[in-house]
Amino acid sequence: MMMLPPNTRIYIATVKVDMRKSIDGLSILVHDVLNKDPMSGHLFVFSNKRGDKLKILYWDRTGFCLWYKRLEKSVFRLPKIQGNVFSVNPTELGMILEGIDLHHQQRLNALDNASVN
């Protein structure tokens, strides 16, 4: 996982996003739907309707960065929260990215290379 400055917030959007959206489309969502500044340096996490893909958008002082992860055999277990956005800490984001259900804290089975092909 990347090292984050201590004042960096991690926001997870509850609205499901079309994963064809690129940096420009996601930054508009951050501003218009989440009511946040996309150039703040904070991380903005988006998932698709099916829940097997995540994109993380952030500004790193010189430009936007976009991080993308797709699970091959499962879905990300995001907490069910009311509203358009909620915040997690870096440890919780790491758990989400590892496929751990924050409510039950159960890790998904790791895939071996043979099962992916």
Image (cartoon, grey):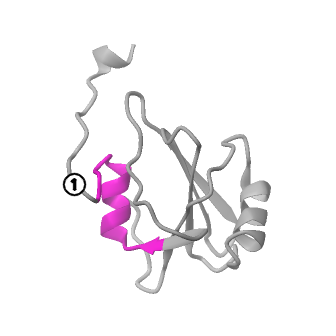
In this rendering, is residue 17 above or below 27?
above
**Residue ID at (20%, 48%):** 106
Residue holding disc 1: 104
Check disc 1: other Cα within 10 Å, few if <14, some if 14-19, many if 20+: few
In this rendering, is residue 96 above or below 43?
above
Q: Quadrant of the C terminus?
A: top left
Q: Position of residue 18 (x, y in %)?
A: 69, 43
* Residue 37 location, quadrant: bottom right
In this rendering, is residue 68 above or below 41?
above
**Residue ID at (29%, 52%):** 101
Q: Residue furthest bottom?
A: 7
Closest to the observer, 71 or 62: 71
Q: What amino acid is labelled 1 in the image?
A: His
What's the magenta region?
87-102
**Disc count in the image?**
1
Q: Position of residue 60 (x, y in %)?
A: 61, 71
Q: Position of residue 110 (x, y in %)?
A: 24, 33
Q: Magenta includes 92?
A: yes
Q: Secondary structure at mark 1?
A: loop
In this rendering, is residue 115 above or below 98?
above
**Residue ID at (29%, 14%):** 114
**Residue ID at (62%, 51%):** 16
* Residue 44 location, quadrant: bottom right
Q: Quadrant of the N terminus?
A: bottom left
